[in-house]
Image (cartoon, helix red, strand yellow):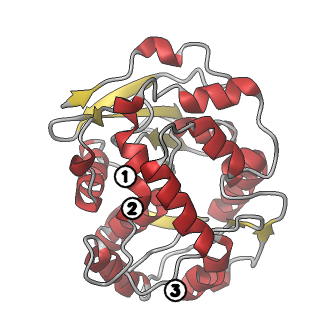
Amino acid sequence: MVIRTSEERFEELPEFDYDHDYVDVGDVRMASVEAGQSADDADETFLCLHGEPTWSFLYRKMIPTLAERGRVVAPDFIGFGRSDKYEDRDAYTVEMHYETLQTFVTELELTNITLVCQDWGGLLGLALAADEPERFARLVPMNTVLPDGTQEMPEIWHRFAETVATAEELDVGRIVQNGCYNDLPADVLEAYRAPFPDERSLAGVRTFPGLVPQSPDEPGADRFAEARERLADWEKPAFVLFGKNDPIMSGFRDSMRELIPTASDQPDVWIDEAAHFLQEDAGEEIAERIVAFVDRT
């Protein structure tokens, strides 16, 4: 069964009054917001992909700066934000998420993309860029990893995945706060809770961590392994930006820089006062760094 979160849940979002639209990506709709230049006039297109358990609201601090430089497209993955949600956890697979993102990009005819991606946005976005490099001009991986099943995830990640999957009550606002360096205002926490009014709507949130392949035989491992092979030959610009205080992903920063050959052409920097959700902790700074990256490449 497909469920849709009432629009009333998204009224009066702090600093996020962008118009939204929907794209049919099969039997479900993927929501997105756009800002900046129009599709016809855009010199640059920034595709901003969120992760677990957030939605496009995560990019609200970055959108104004990116929109001054080009077109900004920030979708919500299926099961998140304003997008449709499957009630059945079994409907959530790596391939479902990949194919709906691929369809979304195809339907909007996105090209000359600067991919800005974090967490699961990185897994899915980098895999798509590896498969369709002609659409992508640049990569900006942030606090993410491409797991082919041979990687070792830290113990804190395993505890997190188990909690998300099995906790009797799940507070998305608390999860986001725990992944931030700075304290978040109450209205921001409520905005992260907005897409999930009840347990039925949380199936995507509960499923995402468990989709990270833990062995090469698990679903998704082959896709991410192939993406790693292709990105090892990537010749277009790439700028790796990680929050220094992310206990889960910070250990993967150097391996991401080593994976993509052109990443070493860009500054070797950390975002110091930022954790997993670095868009919350330092969104304005990150957006300025990304625009500078675009300008110099």
Badge 1 density bin: few <14, some 14–19, many ≥20, Cα 10 Å = many
Spatial CA span between label 1 and label 3:
27 Å
Left or right: where does residue 17 sit relative to residue 77? right
Badge 2 density bin: few <14, some 14–19, many ≥20, Cα 10 Å = some
* Residue 186 sits above or below residue 238 on the image: above
Query: In the rendering, at what x and y percent does residue 181 appear?
Result: 79, 52
Viewer-proximal residue among 264 and 203: 203
Q: Which residue is mark 2?
A: 210
As helix, strand or loop, the secondary structure at mark 1 comes to helix
Query: In the rendering, at what x and y percent does residue 36 appear?
Result: 56, 35
Closer to the eye: label 1 or 3: 1
Spatial CA span between label 1 and label 2:
6 Å
Left or right: where does residue 135 sit relative to residue 168? left
Q: Which residue is mark 1?
A: 207
Q: Which residue is mark 3?
A: 259
Query: In the rendering, at what x and y percent does residue 132 appear?
Result: 30, 67
Viewer-proximal residue among 41 and 63: 63
Q: Disc 1 vs disc 3: Cβ atoms closer than 8 Å?
A: no
Q: Quadrant of residue 135?
A: bottom left
Q: Quadrant of the C terminus?
A: bottom right
Note whether residue 192 is visible.
Answer: yes
As helix, strand or loop, the secondary structure at mark 3 comes to helix
Viewer-proximal residue among 133 and 29: 29
* Residue 151 sits above or below residue 143 on the image: below
- Residue under the image location 58 percent in, 88 percent down: 258
Q: Disc 2 vs disc 3: Cβ atoms closer than 8 Å?
A: no
Q: Earlier in the sequence, mark 2 or mark 3?
A: 2
Q: Name the kind of residue labelled 1 in the image.
A: Thr
Q: Earlier in the sequence, mark 1 or mark 3?
A: 1
Q: Name the kind of residue labelled 2 in the image.
A: Gly
Note whether residue 141 is visible.
Answer: no
